[in-house]
Image (cartoon, coloured by chain):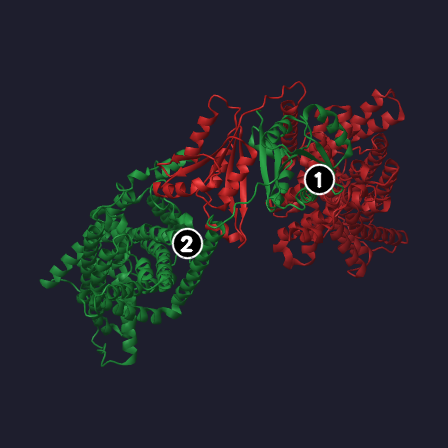
Chain colours: A red, B green
Amino acid sequence: MAIPMRRLLVGRPLPTSRAQHERLNRLLALPVFSSDALSSVAYGTEEILFALVLAGSAALAYSIWIGVAIAALLLVLTISYRQTIFAYPSGGGAYIVASDNLGMGFGAVAGAALLIDYVLTVAVSTASGVAAITSAVPALVHLRVVLCVGFILFVALANMRGVRESGALFSVPTYLFVGSFLAMIGVGLLRHLVGGAPMAYVPPAETAPVGGVHVALVVILLQAFASGCSALTGVEAISNGVQAFKAPEAHNAATTMIWMAVLLGTMFMGLTYLSHVLHILPSHSETVASQIARTVFGGKGAWYFLIQGATALILILAANTSFADFPRLSAILARDRLMPRWLAHLGDRLVFSNGITVLALLAMLLVVVFQGSVHRLIPLYAVGVFLSFTLSQAGMVRRWLRMGAGWLNAKTLTNLLGAMTTLVALGVIASMKFKHGAWVVVFLIIILVLFFFRIHHHYQSLRRQLTVEGWARPAEAKHTVIVMVAGVHRGIVHALDYARLIAADCRALYVEVDPQDTAQLYQRWEKWSAGVPLLILASPYRSLTAPVMQYLDAVQEGDPGHMVTVILPEFVPARWWHHLLHNQSAWLLKLKLLFRRNVIVTNLRYYLDE
Amino acid sequence: MAIPMRRLLVGRPLPTSRAQHERLNRLLALPVFSSDALSSVAYGTEEILFALVLAGSAALAYSIWIGVAIAALLLVLTISYRQTIFAYPSGGGAYIVASDNLGMGFGAVAGAALLIDYVLTVAVSTASGVAAITSAVPALVHLRVVLCVGFILFVALANMRGVRESGALFSVPTYLFVGSFLAMIGVGLLRHLVGGAPMAYVPPAETAPVGGVHVALVVILLQAFASGCSALTGVEAISNGVQAFKAPEAHNAATTMIWMAVLLGTMFMGLTYLSHVLHILPSHSETVASQIARTVFGGKGAWYFLIQGATALILILAANTSFADFPRLSAILARDRLMPRWLAHLGDRLVFSNGITVLALLAMLLVVVFQGSVHRLIPLYAVGVFLSFTLSQAGMVRRWLRMGAGWLNAKTLTNLLGAMTTLVALGVIASMKFKHGAWVVVFLIIILVLFFFRIHHHYQSLRRQLTVEGWARPAEAKHTVIVMVAGVHRGIVHALDYARLIAADCRALYVEVDPQDTAQLYQRWEKWSAGVPLLILASPYRSLTAPVMQYLDAVQEGDPGHMVTVILPEFVPARWWHHLLHNQSAWLLKLKLLFRRNVIVTNLRYYLDE
């Protein structure tokens, strides 16, 4: 039963030799690794406008400059991450770059920050996708959490099927989103240029323009910048997944990075510019993207619904990028003994299935705890990513310096610029969001880093305790086999025969609760014991375990290295419910024996046919 | 941790030799085995009045005659059950009497009927006790189910402590109930005789007396009788528990039976008579007992609250009788292989703890499903008990006839009268209650009887399959030990040493996922293998189990009797959370191996110190 179900869900196992074939070309890699970054176009501009409108609707004019600042940051990040990709073609995630150049500690912080952000990305993007759906069909509002969990399971399952299959599946909606948004921006700009574009909103004359730069305005501008930076999350995804690309890996990854940056920059700036010239006001009842689409296409026609549908899809699929990177990163951490080793095991379909499962579980937990509310999850977001940006860029600077390039070398300067700008952005984001929940992320990063070190410590200690280097092999031990008998039947005879097979010193042990039964046992023993001596232990309190423990104490007294194999004969019923009819007290004995050293418990099963 | 908690709750274990000491004298046995029967006084009269009032308030006058009929039935039952006790001093429950004289089938029906009724008794009596409490403190109404579950757990736990301890604990409220009710009846009768008793209700003149006997009236009288019969449930309890009495068991049990019958008869008839002369009208807002108490004691004084408190207590404690009898009966059924054998095991405190647990779980389930509503549980009640009455009495008749006593022998006639009257009562009860839920009980009895026979069949088949009579001991088998190795470390070396200890034919098996690791393994193998050959199994799909299964197929091919011991080396971490860090894939292998015949799985544990 188990196997066919599994086959149906994730497909038949792939041999290790297929690993190369499972890799992605650039057209498939772009949707896999960019859906997170591209999807932020759907809300990036809106976040900026919401922050600015607090200073009055005239302040919305600053959105262009905030947009330019973020686009500049994107440019710097793209150039510096391309350098990283070429420097670390085996997967240049922030964790590797930071630990390689700045030390394990910084590496662990970068790794923790990214892992947390990936979980948040899945939760936030799924929740926003579901919010888009429930805006369209309000009847589904009370199914919000169920829908979120369902979509997370769906994306997780698709990823279980392998990178290539999920890439192919999810490329269609990504390209649909890109195509429809580019079309909308193109049409919007054209109509604006020819002067025929309607305005969504005409600013009332009484709104005085904001005069001079004062403190409150600076804060609001910084907040707008911090909010807009969420559009840059996911930019690092390609650098973590270089090994998922077909050869030449670095080259293909770097090219894909350029494509992604161009698309992201164009769409983000296009939307921001359109929202400015169309005089879009942020609103809680309609998204900015929806307003632009409605204005550009003149009402709610087919194009409008295409834009809205593509937006919902891309938001849900943004989770896919996390599913591509989280398992990869945790496998790398596991290989370096900072996370449990089972995260590094390749599953049936050549993906790190355990990491996919862990990510899905954590994201579902988050969605359930926060009841699928985007609003409450958003402030936790972006801090982790920008921390990893800064650490990764700083690591690259260190790397160039160590390799002999001076401070004035172009590569050094590029990554230095990247490090500085992302540090400034991190500072702005952290200070603006700290009270609203970013502290939780900081706290979680610290906890996770501590965990990494505990785990690392354990694996090192394990290595020390298990190594055979310089270890003296123990001398051959004495060995006694004890067969627990409850009567004389075929299963017991079977166990006695096995005991005689594995040791010269065999003893049968009978725990006496009712002396009448003992007499019956004796009658048959002679014939079937095959010479194994029978020991009767009285049990005045009717306990099975206590007399056995006392006997083992006696056997091992003076020689704790004396090996004792305790054989528990059991019969295996033909039907599951028959188990309910049998005494399970052997389980208790087994449990107690598990805690004794040099006692080996062997269940000897005798199979029943009916 | 586990042991001290258990000690605290149920006390220290009692040795088997204390069994005699744990038995009950008559003063303790009366409350244990009669609280069920006596508690029905609290609602028996009321049930009759509710049935009669449907024919108009004048019909209430018939209550005396219904009461007389029920008292007569009680007399017949008492005399016939005394005969049963003396005939079956080892515990003469309906199951034993019926199966001994009428055959296993009737015995099983009687046993099933009683078991179901005991579960219902616990649920109904606890629910009525809690209803009495929530009438007094309405704020507790929404805690009804929680209170029911709590009381069931409390009574179950007290019974776990042993028969004598629970008997002593619960005797106080039982005697309090008997004393206070007898006092109330005495005072009431006295005030009635001297003519000073007030009337609760003066019948209005316009109520025409019921004229003649017509069909509707007959039905109502029968319904009143059927309802009143619930007062007789629990009368059989003593006969089931003869072995709980101190010696001479039968004599003491028979005497206690008389005491119980006299108390029950007196209290029931006294209350019925008082309700008649005080003109009590049944009401949904106040119980009949409460009305009588208020009328007799002239308002809600100390006596009134004593009566109400004692009533609530006895209703909850009525469950205690079931806890004394259900585990005893299921132990007898288990000994006869009609129920799982673990129900016959004496626990730490010389009670059948497993039966107590099963009863508590079933009753709690019932209470939760029915949301603690007495009203919905009551119709299920009494059918089972009367069925067991009839079967038990019929069995006794058969017994006397088989022993040579004729039909006209006094003993035969007594039990025949008992059988006939309870059969009539059963017919009335079943027909009156069938639609209202009694059909569920009939259905459950059939299901349970079928279960009994399935279980019996299994134990017989087990016996056939396991018996050594006429069985040829198999010839000595070949034995091969396979050690699963994942590398070379101390745990593996330990396992290799154990393997060499238990068999001459040892092999080490390594499942290769990455050929690079294999090279490393080979380097160290020579030094530490102690001559055990190393076999490498390639695993192109990275599965641990598939190659091992194939190898076992090859080993056992041609000789399925070839015994193979598979040794799974494992290390035991010092802290529980370390388990999370290790690969649990050996579990999957173990699970698959469990289904292979002649393959023995042995976990070889290597203990870590930190």
Question: Is A118 in front, or is A67?
Answer: A118
Under mark 2, the amino acid is Met
Q: Looking at the rendering, which quadrant does residue A121 occupy?
A: top right
Where residue A319 appears, as percent x and y from the top left, is 72, 45
Where residue A209 appears, as percent x and y from the top left, is 77, 42
> Label 2's element?
loop
> Label 1's element?
helix
Under mark 1, the amino acid is Tyr
User: Does residue A554 appear to the left or right of A45 in the view shown?
Assistant: left
User: Does residue A383 appear to the left or right of B113 in the view shown?
Assistant: right
Q: Are marks 1 and 2 in contact (CB under 8 Å)?
A: no
User: Does residue B187 appear to the left or right of A406 in the view shown?
Assistant: left
Where residue B152 appears, as percent x and y from the top left, is 37, 49
Up-down: is A194 above or below B481? below
Farthest residue in the right direction? A194
In percent of the image, x 40 and y 49: which residue is there? Answer: B343
Q: Is residue A57 visible?
A: no
**Residue on which disc 2 sits:** B339
Where residue A215 appears, as percent x and y from the top left, is 71, 32
Question: Is A577 in front, or is B97?
Answer: B97
Mark carried by residue A118: 1
Q: Looking at the rendering, which quadrant does residue A512 occupy?
A: top left
